Image: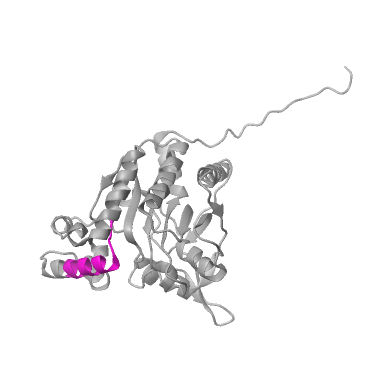
Amino acid sequence: MRDVLAPESSRWRRVTSVFAEVVESAGYQQIIPPIMEDLGVFTRIGEATDVVTKEMYDFVDKGDRHVALRPEQTASVCRAFVEHRPLTPWKTWYSGPNFRYEKPQRGRYRQFDQVGIEVLGVDDPLLDVEVIALGWDFYRRLGLQQVQLVVNSLGEPEDRARYIDSLRAYFDAADGLSDQSRTTLAKNPLRVLDSKRPQDAPIIVGAPTIADFWSDEARSHFEAVQSGLRQLGIPFTVDMKLVRGLDYYRHTTFEFVGGTLESAQNALGGGGRYDGLVEALGGPPTPGIGFALGVERALIACDDEGVFPAPDPAVDVFVIDTTGG
């Protein structure tokens, strides 16, 4: 965790202001969820994920309630939807700090800020396109030119389940998989695809791809998303190994990658569709999609590209002689 002093703090405010301008022009309104929630809100994002098992700051408070500092805000937004039941489609945006117990390094902090949007109540691939386009526009407004968009689809829940079974069988039979990935495999085979360890790379290259398991509906949805991005002139790459870090994603997943950042920490932000999360939190079946973008990494990328500088700390001073001399 760290302090952010002026003039850098002014640049942080400007980032949020630019983001608000971009998304509010598309009808998104701000939500300010609490920083601390009941632990159960976040365990719904996937009890096999590192976010839940290793990275959350959770504790029992003085009222004997098991609570956690939020590691992300999508689950909080969905909890708020279940509690308040706003009219759908509900289009909302947020900003603020999250907390994860991770090893600090360039672009990764234990307290980190994000801006993001969520849309609940619409199952339409063109909405996926709108959401991705707003993220793309935000980076362009910052002046970034070396941002790459990567997309994939995890299909229907049944498609994903069959794919996970196939991955588990494939990696179980593979020779040379790292011990760390063997441990990950036991909890979540999809996460093995994210391994950056050199000994895992040749094994991952030969792994089955999700496209072999898509239903007709899933394939049609993803093709519509790609078509919409092409019509908007947004360049993208399809990466069948892109699964994102949380268990709630279905159908479209995407990531914005910084071309100037080191490969291990080059994701500026990302998101996807999570059509089952509201239901897992006790609400009615409600489709949802959104993204979260890291403020720290965006500003690092801006520094690398020499754009969106901090404001000049100098002030104008006027001296007036009131003595009449």
Is 134 placed left or right of 212 in the picture? right
Task: Give percent across and percent down for residue 286.
Answer: 43, 66
Q: Nearer the viewer, residue 132 or 190?
A: 132
Task: Give percent across and percent down for residue 244.
Answer: 32, 58
Specify whether residue 107 is in view: no
As drawn, which residue projects farthest toward the top? Answer: 325
**Depicted 77 relative to depicted 186: above or below:** above
**Depicted 118 relative to depicted 34: above or below:** above
Task: Give percent across and percent down for residue 263.
Answer: 29, 48
What residue sits 49% from the left and 60% below the top?
Answer: 98
Is 150 placed left or right of 165 in the picture? right
Q: Is residue 159 magenta?
A: yes
Q: Which residues are magenta?
A: 153-168
Q: Assign the magenta stretch its main secondary structure.
A: helix
What residue sits 44% from the left and 63% below the top?
Answer: 100
Q: Nearer the viewer, residue 286 or 14?
A: 286
Q: Quadrant of the C terminus?
A: top right
Find residue 86 and report its image quarter: bottom right
What residue sits 27% from the left and 61% below the top?
Answer: 155
